[in-house]
Image (tube, rainbow, N blue to C red):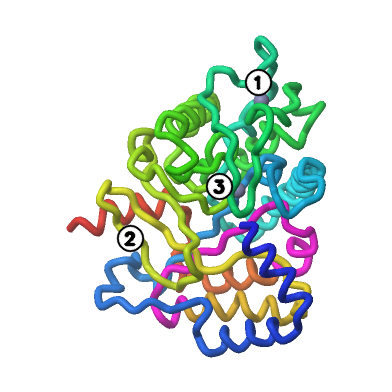
Amino acid sequence: MEFLQIEKIRSTQFPLKSLIGKLSFELGRNPKIEKKANYQDYIPKPYKSVLIISADFELAWAFRFSKSQKNPVENALEHGRLTRKNVPEIVKLCEKHNIPITWATVGHLFLESCSKENGHAHSDLKKLDHFESPFWKFDNGDWFKDDPCTDYKTDPEWYAPDLIKLITESSVNHEIGSHTFSHIDCRESVCTPDIFSSELKKCVEVANDYDIQLKSFVYPGHTFGNFNLLPEFGFTSFRTNYLNILGYPIKKSNKLWEHQSTAEFDIRHSWSIKYQIYRYKKIIDKAIKNNTNCHFWFHPSFQHQFVTDVMPAVFEYIDEMRKEIFITTMGEYTQWLNENMSK
Ligand SMILES: [Zn+2]
Ligand SMILES: [Zn+2]
């Protein structure tokens, strides 16, 4: 996540890098196209390609320990506000073109409110110890120290029951997945199985209150780990972002499916809007031509300009091509894989 942001800044500063980005796209190096002899087994008939769009839905939770910011909490709040501005417009656009999104949602967003007990937030949860990673630094206080412990009307950057209802009550068949309860670092070196389980258990509980069964998981900040615990909580698949790939899902030994991402939806200031639209359309064309999956992902806190200037054209194109593309969610496609790949 943050690595990609740093990359973006670099490409803005260095026009050569933006040119190389264009070149590597035209040469078919990014995204990489995977070849598979039994590719047809992965694509439901009569389609030529599978398209998934997933969102890391987190409001302020993702960026509060960011090392690249002077004031990470203020920056996190800004991400929360931008998400609130963007999501209703994205949901409308999805309705216009009947395109579902897999919303990997931070569990805390399901809450309408929360409060401190004996001076601590969420004392029922097992919490991370202090740690530092290349991108995050958590070196003082409690993991929930920035949680306002109020409600969604007072601090709308930390709770989102209203947005979750907007998504689930939409005419489009969106999926609500999980992004842990409090956007933790899931790597085994930082997160014990107890902490990971405690977070997932809480996610399952809060989603149950909405009659939502969580099936799809996205790791916060690409901190992959504790894979074997996911099925215990009902998850059937997870997303990885190791590289940008037009490829196929991978069945893991614990029966989970791994969905690999293809490209991030975001504004790139070094490229024109026209080129950015061209590029996303071309990725879709490549997926159809090569009979692969195409998995776009995004942070709904991206710049509003993406929603107004890029997304409408890309969604319109997906809609136009829907006879060729199985437009689906992580959960629905995983179910199809489980029903069809074992035969
Ligand atoms: Zn809370
Ligand atoms: Zn995240």
Reading the chain from its start, which is encountered first: label 1 or label 2? 1
Whether disc 3's CB lies below 8 Å from ligand 2 is answered yes
Residue segment shown in magenta:
287-311
Label 1 to label 3: alpha-carbon separation = 21 Å
* SS at badge 1: strand
Q: Where is residue 105 drawn, in percent x and y?
A: 58, 41
- Position of the N terminus by quadrant: bottom right
Location of residue 8 with respect to 189 vertically, above or below:
below
Q: Residues within 10 Å of mark 3 (few under 14, many from 20)?
A: many
Ligand 1 within 8 Å, label 1 CB: yes
The residue positioned 73% from the left and 68% from the top of the image is 267
Dot 2 surroundings within 10 Å: few (below 14), some, or many (20 or more)?
few
**Tag on residue 39?**
none
Mark linked to residue 121: 1
Residue drawn 54% across and 32% down?
128
Give yes or no for residue 248 being in the magenta stretch. Answer: no
Q: Nearer the viewer, residue 257 or 144?
A: 144
Tell me if residue 28 can be seen.
Answer: yes
* CB under 8 Å between discs 2 and 3: no
User: What type is the residue that disc 1 sits on?
Assistant: Ala
Residue 298 lies in magenta, yes or no?
Answer: yes
Name the kind of residue labelled 3 in the image. Pro
Residue drawn at 73 percent across, 31 percent down: 146
The crowd level at tag 1 (other Cα within 10 Å; few <14, some 14-19, many 20+) is some
Disc 1 to disc 2, C-alpha distance: 38 Å
Mark 2 is on which residue type? Ile
* Disc 3: which residue: 220
In the rendered structure, which disc, 2 or 3, sits on the residue that comes first in sequence?
Answer: 3
Residue 250 numbered mark, or none? 2
Q: Classify mark 3: helix, strand or loop.
A: helix
Would residue 211 be visible to someone looking at this image? Answer: no
